[in-house]
Amino acid sequence: MRARDLAEAVDAGDLTPAALVELAAERITTFEPDIRAFAHLDLDAARLRAARMTTREGLFGLPIGVKDIIETAAMPTGHGSPLYTGHQPKADAAIVVMAEDAGGILIGKTATTEFAYLEPAPTRNPHDPARTPGGSSAGSAAGVAAGLMPLALGTQTGGSVIRPASFCGVAAVKPSYRLLPMAGVKPFAPLLDTLGLFGARVVDVAFGLAAISGRPLDVAGQDFGTPTFGVTRLPFAGAAAPESEAALLAAIRAIEAAGGRVVELGLPPILAEAHAAHQIINNYEGALALAYEHRRRRESLSPILLAALDAGAAIPVAEFDAARSRANRARKATQDLFAAVDVLLTYSAPGAAPGPETTGDARFNKLVTLLGLPAVNVPLHRHESLPVGVQVIGRFGDDLRALAAAAWLEARACPAAGS
């Protein structure tokens, strides 16, 4: 379900918001039993809201899925944990209010891992049910990939927007840190937690982000010139599988064939130090954010989460402060990276989606999240039956350039995306 195309159809009078909800409902009836993208659905409430809509602007009544760590007053918010089964918040998160004010229609809460950490969700990858959709925004990525809704909100603390988008073959944007407000979103690591958006194509996530944020980020039909891409393989993150390298090489070939410029970049040592600092910040803050659950309800936590919280609680405050200092130095150092290029280009994930016993590895996303830079997954490569994306990264605050460059690449590497 292509968000921009559907919105244009509503604007032209060819579709109505009510018809959009029914399109989603039909797909959900057919595919949701196998995909299990939703933790909670309320199509009746969506139908009622669609019937009452009078404005034809913003998101034009597009159905939206919302990750189940984002609070909703009209639907339970379970955080992917049995501790919060049936939990009913008193208020909507700020991002939910913004999405509805922009003309979006909330159809359900998408499945997530336990407290957005690593314990796998029940969701399956639409391309192969024996593979993970990624995490922690599993339901949002898989639901968009299966055509259950055109847009879905997720969050990223390590790689939980870009990685599942790559595994599921959809576009996604993790905006600059705090471009979207986190009020009302269950925190894990506040220095890292970032809201993001999934859609079928880059133009769809740009359209959705523009409407929800109120910022001029829509890139469709605009000419931003030919971008220069700085390629990095993030060597300190480890080696990528052949399919991820093939995706990166395919992107480079498409850029050069279209007259774009590719520059191989070296990275300053402080970025390797910051990459290592991510886990310290993640675990330390996680132990604080989930202090009640860790101390009072530890018997109800999964072994993988409990181990991370135990490790985080043991980190000395001096070590955490030193990690924050390394992150701050690295953020300053990134300014020089963009002196001769418009955006960076690297892997979105180490390879194609692995089995459902894991959510995959975020090692090619952690640094970008720590630095707060905007990142976009471009779904452009296939490995056997599985999709593999590449990651386009922008300067902090320059989300428009990151989206424009990603859309430029997608249009040239995947011509069918524009049809």
Image (cartoon, grey):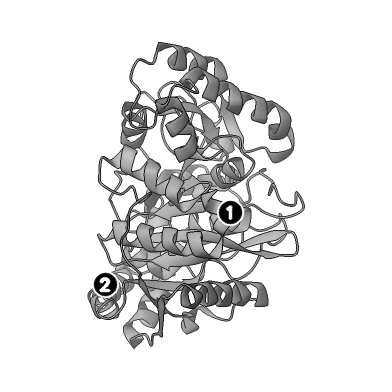
Residue 294 x %, y % = 48, 49
Question: Residue 38 is drawn in which quadrant?
Answer: top right
Q: Are marks 1 and 2 in contact (CB under 8 Å)?
A: no
Question: For the residue marked with disc 1, what is the amino acid?
Answer: Ala
Q: Is residue 384 left or right of residue 275?
A: right
Residue 280 at least partly seen:
no
Question: Residue 329 is drawn in which quadrant?
Answer: bottom left
Q: Which residue is mark 2?
A: 331
Residue 184 at least partly seen:
yes
Q: Which residue is mark 1?
A: 416
Q: Is residue 133 left or right of residue 396?
A: right
Question: Residue 167 is drawn in which quadrant?
Answer: bottom right
Residue 10 x %, y % = 44, 26
Q: Is residue 71 left or right of residue 252?
A: left
Q: Which secondary structure, mark 1?
A: helix
Query: Quarter holding the N terminus?
Result: top right
- Tell me: residue 406, above or below residue 75: below
Q: Name which residue lies at 63% across and 69% down.
A: 351
Alpha carbon of mark 1 to alpha carbon of mark 2: how far? 36 Å
Nearer-the-camera pick, 118 or 197: 197
Q: Which secondary structure, mark 2?
A: helix
Q: Name which residue lies at 43% across and 76% down.
A: 259
Q: Name which residue lies at 46% across and 72% down.
A: 258
Q: Earlier in the sequence, mark 1 or mark 2?
A: 2
Nearer-the-camera pick, 126 or 159: 126
Question: For the residue marked with disc 2, what is the amino acid?
Answer: Arg
Q: Is residue 16 left or right of residue 332?
A: right
